[in-house]
Image (spheres, helix red, strand yellow):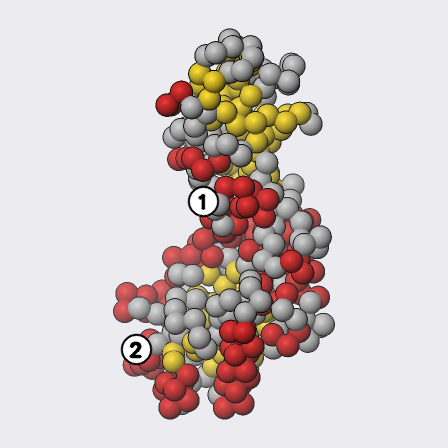
Protein backbone atom coordinates (compact mmCIF):
# COMPACT_ATOMS: atom_id res chain seq x y z
CA UNK A 1 0.00 0.00 0.00
CA UNK A 2 1.28 3.46 -0.89
CA UNK A 3 1.83 5.70 2.13
CA UNK A 4 0.04 8.99 1.51
CA UNK A 5 0.67 11.82 3.98
CA UNK A 6 -2.42 13.43 5.49
CA UNK A 7 -2.98 17.19 5.22
CA UNK A 8 -4.22 17.08 8.83
CA UNK A 9 -2.37 15.95 11.91
CA UNK A 10 -3.17 15.76 15.59
CA UNK A 11 0.02 16.24 17.57
CA UNK A 12 -0.35 14.44 20.90
CA UNK A 13 1.71 15.06 24.02
CA UNK A 14 2.42 11.79 25.84
CA UNK A 15 4.07 13.57 28.77
CA UNK A 16 1.04 15.82 29.28
CA UNK A 17 -1.30 12.81 29.20
CA UNK A 18 0.73 10.99 31.86
CA UNK A 19 1.13 14.13 33.98
CA UNK A 20 -2.64 14.67 33.91
CA UNK A 21 -3.25 11.08 35.04
CA UNK A 22 -0.73 11.42 37.86
CA UNK A 23 -2.30 14.65 39.10
CA UNK A 24 -5.76 13.09 39.04
CA UNK A 25 -4.45 10.00 40.85
CA UNK A 26 -2.92 12.18 43.57
CA UNK A 27 -6.22 13.91 44.37
CA UNK A 28 -7.54 10.89 46.26
CA UNK A 29 -4.73 11.26 48.78
CA UNK A 30 -3.37 7.85 47.85
CA UNK A 31 -6.44 6.04 49.08
CA UNK A 32 -7.78 5.08 45.66
CA UNK A 33 -6.40 3.80 42.40
CA UNK A 34 -6.95 5.94 39.32
CA UNK A 35 -8.20 4.31 36.15
CA UNK A 36 -8.80 5.78 32.72
CA UNK A 37 -11.83 6.02 30.45
CA UNK A 38 -10.95 5.04 26.87
CA UNK A 39 -14.41 5.48 25.38
CA UNK A 40 -14.73 6.72 21.80
CA UNK A 41 -11.21 5.52 20.90
CA UNK A 42 -9.57 7.27 23.81
CA UNK A 43 -11.73 10.39 23.37
CA UNK A 44 -10.49 10.54 19.79
CA UNK A 45 -6.77 10.36 20.54
CA UNK A 46 -6.39 6.64 19.85
CA UNK A 47 -7.43 4.20 22.55
CA UNK A 48 -4.64 1.68 22.06
CA UNK A 49 -1.90 4.31 22.25
CA UNK A 50 -3.50 5.97 25.29
CA UNK A 51 -3.71 2.60 27.05
CA UNK A 52 -0.07 1.84 26.29
CA UNK A 53 1.18 5.19 27.59
CA UNK A 54 -0.91 5.11 30.76
CA UNK A 55 -0.19 1.44 31.48
CA UNK A 56 3.52 2.21 31.22
CA UNK A 57 2.96 4.96 33.81
CA UNK A 58 1.21 2.57 36.19
CA UNK A 59 -2.49 2.75 35.30
CA UNK A 60 -4.16 -0.67 35.62
CA UNK A 61 -7.90 -0.06 35.20
CA UNK A 62 -9.43 0.98 31.90
CA UNK A 63 -13.01 1.52 30.73
CA UNK A 64 -14.61 1.41 27.28
CA UNK A 65 -18.23 1.79 26.23
CA UNK A 66 -18.80 -1.22 23.96
CA UNK A 67 -17.48 -4.68 23.21
CA UNK A 68 -16.24 -3.58 19.80
CA UNK A 69 -14.10 -0.98 21.58
CA UNK A 70 -12.83 -3.71 23.88
CA UNK A 71 -11.95 -5.96 20.94
CA UNK A 72 -9.94 -3.15 19.35
CA UNK A 73 -7.67 -3.04 22.41
CA UNK A 74 -6.72 -6.71 22.36
CA UNK A 75 -4.42 -8.24 23.40
CA UNK A 76 -4.26 -6.63 26.82
CA UNK A 77 -0.96 -6.18 28.59
CA UNK A 78 -0.32 -8.29 31.67
CA UNK A 79 -1.89 -6.87 34.79
CA UNK A 80 -4.31 -4.58 32.95
CA UNK A 81 -8.04 -4.68 33.70
CA UNK A 82 -10.70 -3.66 31.17
CA UNK A 83 -14.41 -3.01 31.85
CA UNK A 84 -17.20 -2.53 29.30
CA UNK A 85 -19.54 0.15 30.58
CA UNK A 86 -22.58 -0.69 28.46
CA UNK A 87 -22.83 -4.19 29.88
CA UNK A 88 -24.15 -7.15 27.90
CA UNK A 89 -26.97 -7.09 25.40
CA UNK A 90 -28.20 -10.30 23.86
CA UNK A 91 -25.86 -9.86 20.90
CA UNK A 92 -22.84 -9.19 23.14
CA UNK A 93 -22.60 -12.53 24.91
CA UNK A 94 -20.19 -14.18 22.48
CA UNK A 95 -17.74 -11.30 22.86
CA UNK A 96 -18.32 -11.20 26.60
CA UNK A 97 -17.40 -14.87 26.92
CA UNK A 98 -14.31 -14.68 24.71
CA UNK A 99 -12.71 -11.36 25.60
CA UNK A 100 -10.79 -10.85 28.85
CA UNK A 101 -12.94 -7.91 29.93
CA UNK A 102 -15.63 -7.48 32.57
CA UNK A 103 -19.15 -6.32 31.75
CA UNK A 104 -20.61 -3.52 33.83
CA UNK A 105 -24.10 -4.91 34.41
CA UNK A 106 -26.63 -2.09 34.23
CA UNK A 107 -30.06 -3.68 34.61
CA UNK A 108 -31.90 -6.64 36.08
CA UNK A 109 -32.14 -8.00 32.53
CA UNK A 110 -28.36 -7.84 32.08
CA UNK A 111 -27.81 -9.51 35.45
CA UNK A 112 -30.19 -12.30 34.45
CA UNK A 113 -28.50 -12.70 31.07
CA UNK A 114 -25.07 -12.98 32.73
CA UNK A 115 -26.40 -15.55 35.20
CA UNK A 116 -28.29 -17.55 32.55
CA UNK A 117 -25.06 -17.85 30.56
CA UNK A 118 -23.55 -19.66 33.54
CA UNK A 119 -20.84 -17.04 33.97
CA UNK A 120 -19.03 -17.38 37.27
CA UNK A 121 -16.35 -14.83 36.38
CA UNK A 122 -16.34 -11.52 38.25
CA UNK A 123 -18.40 -8.70 36.78
CA UNK A 124 -18.85 -5.03 37.57
CA UNK A 125 -22.22 -3.51 38.45
CA UNK A 126 -23.61 0.00 37.96
CA UNK A 127 -26.25 1.24 40.39
CA UNK A 128 -28.09 4.47 39.59
CA UNK A 129 -28.00 6.94 42.49
CA UNK A 130 -29.77 9.82 40.77
CA UNK A 131 -28.76 10.23 37.13
CA UNK A 132 -31.45 7.99 35.59
CA UNK A 133 -29.23 6.90 32.75
CA UNK A 134 -27.66 3.45 33.12
CA UNK A 135 -27.72 1.32 36.24
CA UNK A 136 -29.97 -0.76 38.43
CA UNK A 137 -32.27 1.20 40.67
CA UNK A 138 -31.22 1.21 44.32
CA UNK A 139 -34.25 -0.83 45.35
CA UNK A 140 -33.44 -3.44 42.69
CA UNK A 141 -29.83 -3.70 43.82
CA UNK A 142 -30.86 -4.06 47.45
CA UNK A 143 -33.80 -6.33 46.70
CA UNK A 144 -31.81 -9.44 45.84
CA UNK A 145 -31.09 -8.88 42.17
CA UNK A 146 -27.34 -9.07 42.81
CA UNK A 147 -27.36 -12.04 45.15
CA UNK A 148 -24.62 -14.53 44.36
CA UNK A 149 -22.78 -12.35 41.84
CA UNK A 150 -19.01 -12.09 42.08
CA UNK A 151 -18.80 -8.30 41.90
CA UNK A 152 -15.37 -6.88 41.28
CA UNK A 153 -16.35 -3.18 41.19
CA UNK A 154 -19.64 -1.66 42.29
CA UNK A 155 -20.00 1.76 40.71
CA UNK A 156 -22.32 4.68 40.22
CA UNK A 157 -22.03 7.89 38.19
CA UNK A 158 -22.31 11.51 39.31
CA UNK A 159 -24.83 13.57 37.36
CA UNK A 160 -23.78 17.09 38.38
CA UNK A 161 -20.17 16.88 39.53
CA UNK A 162 -19.10 19.72 37.25
CA UNK A 163 -21.44 22.03 39.21
CA UNK A 164 -21.72 23.04 42.86
CA UNK A 165 -24.94 21.08 43.21
CA UNK A 166 -26.60 19.56 46.27
CA UNK A 167 -27.13 16.48 44.13
CA UNK A 168 -23.46 15.58 44.57
CA UNK A 169 -23.80 15.16 48.33
CA UNK A 170 -27.04 13.21 47.90
CA UNK A 171 -25.41 10.79 45.49
CA UNK A 172 -22.39 10.44 47.75
CA UNK A 173 -24.62 9.54 50.69
CA UNK A 174 -26.59 7.07 48.57
CA UNK A 175 -23.43 5.37 47.37
CA UNK A 176 -22.00 5.15 50.88
CA UNK A 177 -25.18 3.38 51.93
CA UNK A 178 -24.82 0.93 49.04
CA UNK A 179 -21.26 0.18 50.06
CA UNK A 180 -22.50 -0.91 53.46
CA UNK A 181 -24.99 -3.38 52.04
CA UNK A 182 -23.56 -4.74 48.77
CA UNK A 183 -20.36 -6.78 48.85
CA UNK A 184 -17.78 -6.01 46.17
CA UNK A 185 -14.02 -6.04 45.91
CA UNK A 186 -13.95 -2.31 45.11
CA UNK A 187 -16.25 0.71 44.97
CA UNK A 188 -16.07 3.52 42.40
CA UNK A 189 -18.03 6.78 42.01
CA UNK A 190 -15.87 9.66 40.76
CA UNK A 191 -15.30 10.75 37.16
CA UNK A 192 -12.97 13.66 36.30
CA UNK A 193 -15.20 16.28 37.90
CA UNK A 194 -15.96 13.99 40.84
CA UNK A 195 -12.25 13.66 41.57
CA UNK A 196 -12.11 17.45 41.93
CA UNK A 197 -14.86 17.33 44.58
CA UNK A 198 -12.38 15.81 47.01
CA UNK A 199 -11.13 12.54 48.44
CA UNK A 200 -14.54 11.69 49.96
CA UNK A 201 -15.71 10.84 46.44
CA UNK A 202 -12.73 8.64 45.55
CA UNK A 203 -13.62 5.37 47.34
CA UNK A 204 -11.36 2.60 45.92
CA UNK A 205 -11.13 3.54 42.25
CA UNK A 206 -11.67 6.71 40.21
CA UNK A 207 -12.60 6.81 36.53
CA UNK A 208 -11.23 10.01 34.94
CA UNK A 209 -11.99 10.76 31.31
CA UNK A 210 -11.98 14.29 29.85
CA UNK A 211 -9.35 15.63 32.28
CA UNK A 212 -6.84 13.03 31.11
CA UNK A 213 -7.02 14.54 27.65
CA UNK A 214 -6.73 18.21 28.56
CA UNK A 215 -10.27 19.13 29.58
CA UNK A 216 -10.94 21.18 32.70
CA UNK A 217 -13.96 19.63 34.45
CA UNK A 218 -14.00 22.07 37.36
CA UNK A 219 -12.04 25.12 38.47
CA UNK A 220 -9.97 23.06 40.90
CA UNK A 221 -8.21 21.44 37.92
CA UNK A 222 -7.21 24.72 36.26
CA UNK A 223 -3.45 25.14 36.25
CA UNK A 224 -2.90 21.43 36.86
CA UNK A 225 -4.24 19.83 33.67
CA UNK A 226 -2.20 20.30 30.51
CA UNK A 227 -3.29 20.36 26.88
CA UNK A 228 -2.70 17.02 25.16
CA UNK A 229 -4.12 17.41 21.63
CA UNK A 230 -2.80 20.02 19.17
CA UNK A 231 -4.53 19.94 15.74
CA UNK A 232 -2.62 21.20 12.71
CA UNK A 233 -3.72 21.74 9.10
CA UNK A 234 -1.65 22.14 5.93
CA UNK A 235 -2.05 25.21 3.73
CA UNK A 236 -3.39 24.44 0.27
CA UNK A 237 -3.14 27.91 -1.13
CA UNK A 238 -2.37 31.49 -0.13
CA UNK A 239 -4.34 33.92 -2.26
CA UNK A 240 -4.54 37.69 -2.56
CA UNK A 241 -7.95 39.19 -1.79
CA UNK A 242 -8.25 42.90 -2.63
CA UNK A 243 -10.13 45.37 -0.45
CA UNK A 244 -13.88 44.94 -0.77
CA UNK A 245 -13.87 41.35 -2.06
CA UNK A 246 -15.49 38.55 -0.04
CA UNK A 247 -14.40 35.10 1.09
CA UNK A 248 -16.35 31.85 1.20
CA UNK A 249 -19.97 30.75 1.07
CA UNK A 250 -22.53 33.47 1.66
CA UNK A 251 -19.91 36.20 1.26
CA UNK A 252 -19.97 36.57 5.03
CA UNK A 253 -16.51 38.18 5.30
CA UNK A 254 -15.37 41.21 3.36
CA UNK A 255 -11.74 42.28 3.17
CA UNK A 256 -11.34 45.66 4.86
CA UNK A 257 -7.87 45.96 3.32
CA UNK A 258 -5.81 44.17 0.70
CA UNK A 259 -5.42 40.77 2.33
CA UNK A 260 -3.65 37.44 2.07
CA UNK A 261 -5.87 34.46 2.80
CA UNK A 262 -4.56 31.00 3.68
CA UNK A 263 -6.92 28.18 2.69
CA UNK A 264 -6.35 24.91 4.57
CA UNK A 265 -7.41 21.26 4.31
CA UNK A 266 -9.92 21.44 7.14
CA UNK A 267 -13.67 21.60 7.59
CA UNK A 268 -16.74 20.32 9.31
CA UNK A 269 -16.22 16.84 7.84
CA UNK A 270 -13.14 16.73 10.07
CA UNK A 271 -15.01 17.87 13.18
CA UNK A 272 -14.00 21.52 12.84
CA UNK A 273 -17.56 22.81 12.85
CA UNK A 274 -19.22 25.92 11.45
CA UNK A 275 -19.67 27.39 14.92
CA UNK A 276 -15.95 28.25 14.91
CA UNK A 277 -16.63 31.04 12.39
CA UNK A 278 -16.19 34.37 14.14
CA UNK A 279 -14.01 33.00 16.93
CA UNK A 280 -11.68 30.40 15.41
CA UNK A 281 -7.99 31.13 15.06
CA UNK A 282 -4.76 29.50 13.96
CA UNK A 283 -1.14 30.45 14.49
CA UNK A 284 1.98 30.24 12.36
CA UNK A 285 5.41 31.02 13.79
CA UNK A 286 3.77 32.88 16.65
CA UNK A 287 1.54 35.01 14.42
CA UNK A 288 -2.22 34.92 14.91
CA UNK A 289 -4.40 34.10 11.89
CA UNK A 290 -8.13 34.74 12.49
CA UNK A 291 -10.65 32.50 10.76
CA UNK A 292 -12.51 34.36 8.00
CA UNK A 293 -15.79 33.48 6.33
CA UNK A 294 -17.60 30.23 6.89
CA UNK A 295 -16.19 26.80 7.63
CA UNK A 296 -17.06 24.51 4.73
CA UNK A 297 -16.88 20.72 4.46
CA UNK A 298 -13.17 20.39 3.65
CA UNK A 299 -11.83 23.94 3.51
CA UNK A 300 -11.38 26.79 5.96
CA UNK A 301 -9.79 30.20 5.37
CA UNK A 302 -7.58 32.19 7.73
CA UNK A 303 -6.40 35.78 7.40
CA UNK A 304 -2.64 35.59 6.83
CA UNK A 305 -2.15 39.26 6.00
CA UNK A 306 0.26 39.69 8.88
CA UNK A 307 2.08 36.41 8.33
CA UNK A 308 4.72 37.35 5.76
CA UNK A 309 6.42 34.28 4.35
CA UNK A 310 3.54 31.88 4.85
CA UNK A 311 3.00 29.78 1.72
CA UNK A 312 1.56 26.61 0.30
CA UNK A 313 2.50 23.48 2.23
CA UNK A 314 3.10 25.21 5.56
CA UNK A 315 1.33 23.92 8.68
CA UNK A 316 -1.00 26.05 10.77
CA UNK A 317 -1.59 25.24 14.43
CA UNK A 318 -5.24 25.56 15.40
CA UNK A 319 -6.12 27.23 18.67
CA UNK A 320 -7.60 24.25 20.53
CA UNK A 321 -7.26 24.85 24.25
CA UNK A 322 -10.37 22.91 25.26
CA UNK A 323 -11.93 25.18 27.93
CA UNK A 324 -11.18 28.38 25.99
CA UNK A 325 -12.47 27.07 22.66
CA UNK A 326 -15.51 25.58 24.40
CA UNK A 327 -16.42 29.00 25.78
CA UNK A 328 -15.93 30.64 22.39
CA UNK A 329 -17.70 28.07 20.23
CA UNK A 330 -20.51 26.84 22.48
CA UNK A 331 -19.35 23.23 22.04
CA UNK A 332 -18.57 21.12 25.07
CA UNK A 333 -14.97 20.09 25.67
CA UNK A 334 -16.09 16.49 24.98
CA UNK A 335 -17.51 17.43 21.57
CA UNK A 336 -14.38 19.35 20.62
CA UNK A 337 -12.14 16.38 21.30
CA UNK A 338 -14.19 13.36 20.23
CA UNK A 339 -15.42 15.10 17.08
CA UNK A 340 -11.99 15.38 15.45
CA UNK A 341 -12.20 13.07 12.45
CA UNK A 342 -10.20 10.15 11.14
CA UNK A 343 -8.48 12.28 8.50
CA UNK A 344 -6.27 13.65 11.27
CA UNK A 345 -3.10 11.61 11.49
CA UNK A 346 -2.44 10.94 15.18
CA UNK A 347 1.19 11.72 15.99
CA UNK A 348 2.51 11.11 19.51
CA UNK A 349 5.52 12.95 20.76
Q: Residue at x 58, y 67 (%)?
A: 164
Q: Could you tell me which residue is drawn at 48 percent across and 74 percent down? A: 156
Q: Residue at x 51, y 10 (%)?
A: 243
| Tag 1 near tag 2, CB within 8 Å | no
Circle 1 residue? 339
Residue 258 horizontal/vertical position (percent): 55, 10
Image side of residue 175 versus residue 296, left or right? right
Q: Which residue is mark 2?
A: 109
> If the image is split into quadrants, where does the N terminus sit?
top left
User: How far apart are the two marked residues, 1 and 2, measured between alpha carbons?
Assistant: 32 Å
- List x then y, in percent, for residue 226: 67, 49
How crowded pointer 2 is (Cα within 10 Å; few <14, some 14-19, many 20+) is rated as some
Question: Toward the viewer: 168 or 201?
Answer: 168
Front-lying residue, 105 or 225: 225
| Residue 9 appearing in the image | no
User: To which quarter of the image does residue 246 belong?
Assistant: top left
- Residue 57, x across and y down, in percent: 67, 58
Q: Nearer the viewer, residue 274 or 124?
A: 274
Amino acid sequence: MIAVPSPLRLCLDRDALVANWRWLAAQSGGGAASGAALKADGYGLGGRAVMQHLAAAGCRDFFVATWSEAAALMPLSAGVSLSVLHGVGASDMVAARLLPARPVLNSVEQVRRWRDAGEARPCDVMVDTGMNRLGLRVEEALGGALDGLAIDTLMSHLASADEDSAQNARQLAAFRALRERIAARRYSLANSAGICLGADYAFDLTRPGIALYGGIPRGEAAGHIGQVAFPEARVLQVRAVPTGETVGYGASWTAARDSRIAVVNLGYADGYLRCHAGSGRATWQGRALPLVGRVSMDLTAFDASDAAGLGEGEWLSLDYDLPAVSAQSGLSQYELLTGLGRRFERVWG
